[in-house]
Image (spheres, coloured by chain):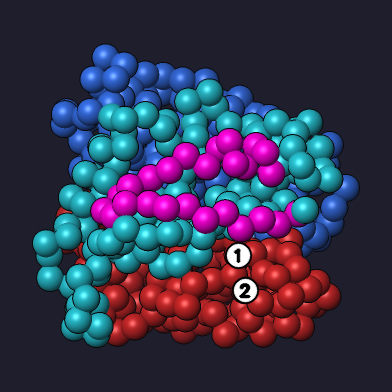
Chain colours: A blue, B cyan, C red
Amino acid sequence: MELKIVEIELEAHGDMKDLTEEIKKFVKESKKDTGAVLVFSVGSTGAITTIEYEPGLKKDFPRIMDKIAPYGDYYEHHKTWHDDNGSSHVKASIVGPSIVIPFVNKKLMLGTWQQVVIVNFDTRARKRRVVLQIL
Amino acid sequence: MELKIVEIELEAHGDMKDLTEEIKKFVKESKKDTGAVLVFSVGSTGAITTIEYEPGLKKDFPRIMDKIAPYGDYYEHHKTWHDDNGSSHVKASIVGPSIVIPFVNKKLMLGTWQQVVIVNFDTRARKRRVVLQIL
Amino acid sequence: MELKIVEIELEAHGDMKDLTEEIKKFVKESKKDTGAVLVFSVGSTGAITTIEYEPGLKKDFPRIMDKIAPYGDYYEHHKTWHDDNGSSHVKASIVGPSIVIPFVNKKLMLGTWQQVVIVNFDTRARKRRVVLQIL
């Protein structure tokens, strides 16, 4: 199967989960030995990036993102929908929804301390959908 | 046609336009039913991302980007060219020039409130070129 | 050859190098006339983006990134490993590890002042590996 949708339960305000094992498995089961895999977050308040997935950075990354676009600020977005997640949208748009990772002989070319993560910047817990696709 | 160049007129300082309909049309007219589409901004003061395209966030996103890299700051770039768009370059490099979006049966796998946008961070109105390409 | 690993020596704290000539050469020697090239940074404290590669922005970009995630701040990451590069990880995760660039008739579709760069956000000089791959 060359495309897979993964569903991930995430807490609010920058919670992240490690997708690396899921992606490795997807690549292993694909028809290609060498290629690239697209990782795409469906929805406007989630984002994909790589990070060293460890408890410290799981706190540092959301803290810095909230310094950039503070939850407590006033956002024009709140006037449109009367909700509270203007900061979430801005954070997700800065980090971005997609990355592409090369693989050779079924092995992802990531660094030892480089994991692929989905981040939920929304202000409520969300089940997020991530698309994995062999390019 | 598997590659298309779109030209978009944009105002200065973070103006954005929704490319989603253009990309949907491009995918519909392509030879592939399932695949991925690259969206790439040509030029160093434009950027591509996804966002909920509504009037509030159209103001919030440029405001936060200008908090990160204020137009009024001093930039070494201005010494090189005697221009005023150092902040534009920095903003565009943070957001980035490319995203890749999966599609299945001719349908883009975007969230309901997730639109693809080109952002012009330059300090003057620009006609920006965006490349769409089936991968 | 459709995949190439490039090794680049970089100084610490946001030093960047221009990869554009290397990528042009790689595309020229590839089997494809028209396609897209993936540029991916291996490791969690490096990032890939496009920028106008000139001496001014080489200083402006790291300065703004350090305003976002200051080196001197306290990071939980430092508690995990007793090192000092929490800010490096956060900066790299914001900018991101991958971009994809279209090419037509062997020519990269970049703007005249748009170069592809690898940035080393680590707090020590690093030899960074960058993967180039034809998609």
Q: Are marks 1 and 2 in contact (CB under 8 Å)?
A: yes
Q: Is residue C71 visible?
A: yes
Snapshot quadrant of residue A1: top right
Q: Which residue is mark 2?
A: C108
Amino acid at dot 1: Ile
SS of the residue under disc 1:
strand
Give left or right: position of A63 versus C97.
left
Q: Are marks 1 and 2 on the same chain?
A: yes
Q: Does residue A79 lie above or below B49 as drawn?
A: above
Ranked by sequence position, the earlier of labels 1 and 2 is 1
Residue A108: horizontal and vertical position, in percent? 68, 56
Give left or right: position of B2 versus A99.
right
Q: Is B7 part of what is drawn in magenta?
A: yes
Identify the magenta region: B2-26
Q: Is B94 part of what is drawn in magenta?
A: no
Residue at image position (19%, 81%) is B82
Residue B56: horizontal and vertical position, in percent? 28, 29
Mark 1 and mark 2: Cα distance apart in space: 7 Å
Amino acid at dot 2: Leu
